[in-house]
Image (tube, rainbow, N blue to C red):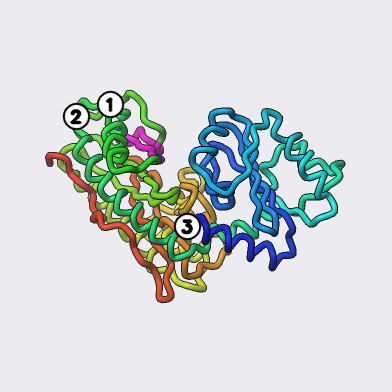
Amino acid sequence: MLREERRARLLEAMSEAGVDAMVVYGNAWQGDYLRYAADFGILEGHGIAIVTAAGAIELYVDSAVEAERAEAETTGLAIALAPDIGRAVAQRLDRIANHRIAAAPRRFLPSFLADAGRAFALADGTALVDRLLMHKLPVELDAMRRAAKLADEGYAVFRKAAIPGRRQYELCSAVEAFLRAKGCPDNFMILGSGGRDVLGMTPPSDRRIVAGDLVTTELTPSVEGYYAQICRTLVVGKATAKQLRAHDVYREALEAGIAAVRPGATAADVARAENDVFRKYGLGDYVTDRYTRVRGHGLGLFVDSKPHILEDVETVLAPGMAIIVHPNTYHPEIGYMVLGDAVLVTETGAEVLLRTPRQLFELGG
């Protein structure tokens, strides 16, 4: 159902825009555009799909393993193994050079395809597909609700695993084992452990958890390709008064950000609501790009999609959009702290997808 509804929606959008063929690119890091069009989540190398107005889909991949997997996991596609993927796609587009062709995301395409000297012209169709990725169908939102349930459950596993002496990668391994047993094929996860020396989160290392650590994580499982994210912080032991006071600021900022989520508001409105809480407590420097990247971001077929929640992003929120609000940043007294909830934009405001309490968890405290 997901596949068919997405394809029908893409064809309708192409028709409205007067696009005869859409060229859609994906790689192992960002495959959301490709997955939307071809229902194929690429894991290795590069993939390019050509979708025609008649509904035909040709998928080109440059990995033999991915070609075999696409044959086994997809339906309704013509699949081609093309080690020189740029030239193979160009040869195909030469045959329809007199048609209106668009590409998404155009900036990611191999330079050979984007060269102005080609017989065909590629309009930038990124915004068209972005709208489809951001404004989700009911079946897509259902998948995100199921992913959010896994995020809550995965964080419960993480809390139990964060014991003194355990290495960071062992925490992640415990969560991965749980999620795989639940049928979850993909989970993006970063974490941090320590004190004032920790400036952010990273992929897991062999650093051991010790008593007194703040342990942070951003945990992002997927269901049918759709990601939901949770951000939480725990203390190994009893939380100090400073840590509790700091966490109160993050909770207030998160709640202010979620309260700002409503149709007609902008991503900038949400970011400003979060940041104003930090400014109120004299922590305005810590919501600048010196200490933090974004105050949240879109969720869906990619773990970090549009819109980015920043004060200069004027994307208007609308029902059917999914974002995570997370005032994650460094605190000068206690170190890096995170707190974030995935939400859906509804007709009346925000539907919070997570059920994990917004508290500073104490492990054995």
Q: Could one spot residue 312 in this view of the protein?
A: no
Residue in the foreground of this view, choosing between 282 and 127: 127
Q: Residue beneath label 3, please?
A: 2
Q: How far apart, in angstroms, are the residues tagged by discs 3 and 1?
A: 39 Å
- Which x, y percent locates residue 183? 32, 42
Query: What is the three-letter code of the residue carrying label 3?
Result: Leu
242 falls in the magenta region: no
- The range drawn in magenta is 188-201
Q: Position of residue 88 (x, y in %)?
A: 74, 35
Where residue 285 sits in the image (x, y, percent)?
46, 50
Q: Mark 1 points at which residue?
A: 167
Say which label, 2 or 3, has the lower sequence index. Answer: 3
The amino acid pointed to by label 2 is Pro
Q: In the displayed structure, does residue 156 sit left or right of residue 201? A: left
Q: Which of marks 3 and 1 is nearer the N terminus?
A: 3
Please state which of the two labelled residues, at mark 2 or mark 3, is closer to the viewer.
Answer: 3
- 351 and 288: which one is in front? 351
